[in-house]
Image (spheres, rainbow, N blue to C red):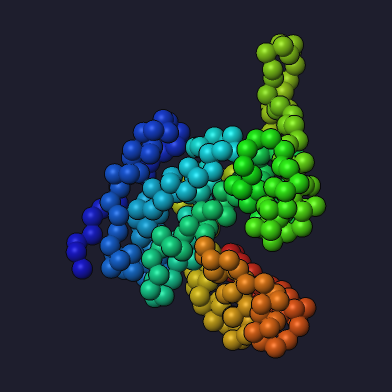
């Protein structure tokens, strides 16, 4: 195995975004052997320097992923910061023994955090609260041919591609076209007017603080794979097919019901119990 280099300084998003992007692009990538070694050090010894090297070497992945969501009108730096949180979650759950590179595993967690941020901030009123609505929200944004309203034929085509009802597409389109209420004072507002943004405080920790916080780094030291190993074989199959498919489409309850020879409701019940056990196993250590 080649000699490991010292970790690069942690880039900061507090300055120029362009300088940050240039800085992360200069951080060396890890070889597969280095990645496995660092993953084992983190898993077995809670080595925070190993975690830092894994995170730093994948910051460029966060930047490239965040660029895919530039059309939502949200600050690119904020999208990157949320993606960095997802990357850190992925590093904590990374299993170096599965033969899968961290880049393939991390992109799911990065996108999940960015999605959550967009849904929290793109509209003051929540527009997508269920899993199906979230899929429709991001799918409609990518499939909509223009900025105007969808025709009946276009609505039916989008519904067909996303596997939803045309009524669901029409309802989501109405939500997407809703007007925002500005939190900041406008040019014509009185100088004594206090904007709502003045009452909102961001109490969330930044990526560097999360990395350095011992409590955050003590989460799930056994990893997701060990928690899964405690489940029975059928529960493992359901959780894997429904939640751990990466970029591939998740299996439906009906798919798994046909595969296992049980009802879709029974599959849902097994899934719910399995996820409850996983959450309990992955709770932060007090």
Q: Quarter of the image holding residue 124? A: top right
Number of numbered labels in the structure image: 0
- Give me the residue at 59% from left, 74% from top: 241
In screen coordinates, is 235 left or right of 217? right
Which is nearer the eye, 26 or 154? 154
Q: Nearer the viewer, residue 147 or 71?
A: 147
- Which residue: 72% across, 48% down? 153
Vertical relation: 175 (above or below) 58: above
- In the image, residue 38 sits, relative to residue 83, either above or below, namely below
Name the residue rendered at 50%, 75% in the picture.
225
**Can residue 124 be seen in the rendering of this structure?**
no
Q: Position of residue 238 (x, y in %)?
A: 63, 78
Q: Position of residue 84 (x, y in %)?
A: 48, 49
Question: From the viewer's perspective, is residue 86 above or below residue 237?
Answer: above
Q: Is residue 25 visible?
A: yes
* Quadrant of image for the C terminus: bottom right
Image coordinates for residue 55, horizontal then vertical, percent: 40, 54
**Residue 202, horizontal then vertical, whole percent:** 62, 38
Q: Residue furthest front?
A: 153
């Amino acid at each position: 195995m080649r000699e490991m280099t010292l970790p690069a300084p942690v880039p900061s998003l507090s300055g120029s975004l362009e300088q940050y992007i240039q800085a992360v692009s200069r951080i060396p990538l890890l070889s597969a052997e280095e990645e496995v070694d660092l993953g084992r050090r983190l898993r077995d010894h809670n080595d925070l320097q190993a975690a830092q090297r894994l995170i730093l070497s994948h910051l460029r992945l966060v930047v490239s992923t965040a660029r895919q969501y530039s059309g939502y009108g949200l600050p690119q730096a904020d999208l990157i910061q949320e993606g960095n949180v997802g990357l850190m979650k992925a590093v904590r759950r990374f299993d170096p023994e599965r033969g899968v590179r961290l880049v393939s595993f991390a992109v799911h967690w990065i996108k999940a955090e960015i999605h959550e941020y967009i849904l929290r901030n793109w509209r003051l009123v929540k527009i997508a609260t269920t899993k199906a609505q979230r899929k429709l929200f991001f799918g409609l944004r990518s499939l909509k041919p223009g900025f105007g309203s969808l025709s009946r034929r276009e609505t039916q085509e989008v519904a067909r591609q996303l596997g939803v009802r045309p009524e669901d597409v029409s309802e989501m389109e109405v939500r997407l076209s809703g007007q925002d209420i500005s939190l900041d004072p406008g040019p014509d507002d009185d100088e004594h007017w206090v904007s709502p943004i003045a009452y909102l405080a961001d109490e969330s920790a930044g990526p560097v603080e999360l990395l350095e916080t011992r409590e955050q780094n003590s989460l799930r030291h056994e990893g997701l794979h060990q928690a899964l190993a405690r489940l029975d074989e059928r529960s493992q199959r359901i959780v894997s097919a429904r939640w751990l498919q990466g970029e591939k489409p998740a299996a439906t309850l009906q798919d798994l019901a046909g595969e296992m020879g049980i009802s879709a409701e029974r599959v849902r019940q097994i899934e719910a119990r399995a996820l409850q056990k996983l959450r309990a196993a992955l709770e932060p250590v007090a």
